[in-house]
Amino acid sequence: MSIKRPIVISGPSGAGKSTLLKRLFAEFPDRFGFSVSHTTRKPRPGEEDGVHYNFVDREQMVKEVADGKFIESAEFSGNMYGTSIAAVDAVTASGRQCILDIDLQGVLSVKRTPLNARFVFLSPPSVEELERRLRARGTETEESLAKRLETARREIEYAKEHPDTHDATVVNDELDKAYVDLRTFVLAED
Ligand SMILES: Nc1ncnc2c1ncn2[C@@H]1O[C@H](COP(=O)(O)OP(=O)(O)OP(=O)(O)O)[C@@H](O)[C@H]1O
């Protein structure tokens, strides 16, 4: 069986991307592989280097981006994030379908590459609910929370105004329902 097109999931911070992908990888460990992004932000409790992210310092990342080692990279909330060519190659080499979790700037960059991905936008039910969830997650300072909410408003607005950017939108209101919707999208034949 040939490997299917990569899938890009994007959506505001706190929309539930990690939560839903964790379920997907638990249900289909052999079918899907995660493209591990690089970031210059500090790990959150429970995050493992090389698993959730490749945690790097800014100097190293700036150099590798300049050396052309990244498919996309972007500045978000005061930190750099990016997808290295090696991260996608590693998944493909394992024989799995690649799943990428990237922000809107990354989505627009990936669209200009030959990756030929399918795109799904994960939306929170509202910005108010997003704020509640981010506060409950307890990972943000007031400053980073405000930045994330501001970016979320822009991303939701952009997705509304440019519906062609994504092949599907999943609203993460009730988690089980959102998971079924996401699962349906990722399993759909190209
Ligand atoms: N449907 C849901 N109902 C209630 N809480 C949810 C739901 N989905 C996710 N959450 C909670 O919301 C918080 C944010 O989810 P998660 O960390 O998965 O978001 P994310 O999109 O991966 O964020 P980031 O991009 O910042 O990593 C988590 O604490 C998670 O447990």
Image (spheres, grey):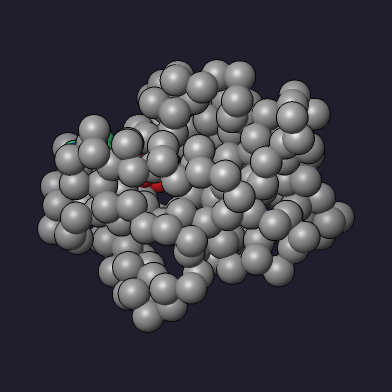
**1, above or below 120, in the image:** above
The residue positioned 81% from the left and 50% from the top of the image is: 69
**157, above or below 152, in the image:** below
The residue positioned 46% from the left and 54% from the top of the image is: 120
Q: Position of residue 52 (x, y in %)?
A: 53, 30
In the image, taking residue 150 as reference, residue 32 lies left or right, namely right
Q: Position of residue 177 (x, y in %)?
A: 23, 39
The residue positioned 37% from the left and 58% from the top of the image is: 169
Q: Nearer the viewer, residue 140 or 103?
A: 103
The residue positioned 48% from the left and 61% from the top of the image is: 167
Q: Nearer the viewer, residue 148 or 161?
A: 161
Residue lying farthest to the bottom in this orientation:
161
Q: Is residue 61 visible?
A: yes
The picture quadrant where one finds residue 21 is: top left
Q: Position of residue 106 (x, y in %)?
A: 58, 60
In terms of image quarters, where does ligand 1 lie? top left
